[in-house]
Amino acid sequence: MPDFKQIQLRGRIFLRFTVQTVTGLHIGGSDTGIEIGGVDKTVIRDPLTNRPYIPGSSLKGKMRSLLEKYEGKIQNQRIGQGFIHSCQDVGDYQTCPVCQVFGVPGERNFSLPTRLVVRDVHMDEAEAERIRKTARTDLPYTEVKTEVSIDRVTSAANPRQMERVPAGTHFGPAELVYTIYSGGGCDPQADVDRLATLVTALQLVEDDYLGGLGSRGSGRVRFTGFEVKLRPQTGYLAEPAVLGAYPTLGDLSAGLAQIQDSVRAKLAL
């Protein structure tokens, strides 16, 4: 007979915050911008508003990539031109914080639902208006950064133009949705414990960079203005309970144990 799983949603934690660019941010878009802006590398934009945004895939991918290196995981799964870590057997999977939080391919017979959802992060109306009124940008909402490579033999200069979101721009609210399950091999207590993995991944991104050109100064970001809410399975349609507000990522980390205790109490774990 098929090995059916019976998995129950116990609750969802909503982590909302603001992403602030500390240095110029470049998350690559299509080449259509070359025609209008004359730059070599354009940023991704919302086609309806023409505003730059941060794709959830970019933030989630960076969080996972840095966490894999932090945990020393083997890069054993080809994705496009590169590799990521993906547990190959149930024994490793049960104790792997990366695969438990970020997921493994669905064809694995031991796979469980991915715990983490990362939303796209858009620029809100107030921030867009601030940039329009106060910033002198080269293109709508963005700057053009010129880089020059020098031929080591001929000393010929080869200039390139990169589009970036200027430093000091705010995107938000960003939203991470973290789901807690029970049954079918899911351990809700372990899911609550792995909230620490999520906070660690955010700290790793703050200390590294987001998007491209990071080794040349771009992509440093800061996460601020955190609000944590919980929607339990019992009374799911009611307004989510506020578990706390934290000005910085450091404050969130310091309050993590209290958040976890509150989640366990409200979910009766």
Image (cartoon, helix red, strand yellow):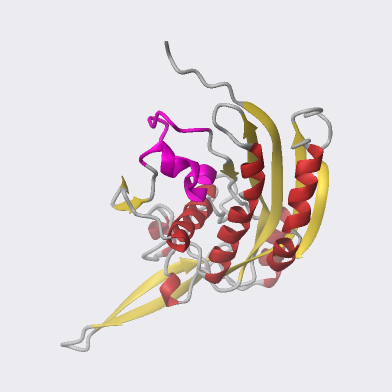
Residue in view at x 49 percent, y 18 percent: 4
Please determine whether, in this image, residue 158 is positioned above or below residue 211. Answer: below
User: Residue 51 in the image: x percent, y percent?
Assistant: 58, 54
Residue 111 colored in magenta in the image: yes
39 displayed left or right of 177: left
Residue 79 in view in this figure: no
230 displayed left or right of 177: right
User: Residue 239 in the image: x percent, y percent?
Assistant: 83, 36
Residue placed most toward the observer, 92 or 207: 92
Residue placed most toward the observer, 227 or 183: 183
Residue 257 colored in magenta in the image: no
Please determine whether, in this image, residue 112 is positioned above or below residue 102. Answer: above
Residue in view at x 49 percent, y 41 percent: 94
Span colored in magenta: 88-112
Q: Quadrant of residue 250?
A: bottom right
User: Residue 125 in the image: x percent, y percent?
Assistant: 71, 54
User: Residue 88 in the image: x percent, y percent?
Assistant: 35, 40
Residue that lies at the very extreme toward the left in this rendered image = 153
Q: Quadrant of residue 200?
A: bottom right
Residue 172 in view in this figure: yes
Count of numbered badges drawn on the protein: 0
Residue placed most toward the observer, 87 or 41: 87
Residue in view at x 74 percent, y 29 percent: 233
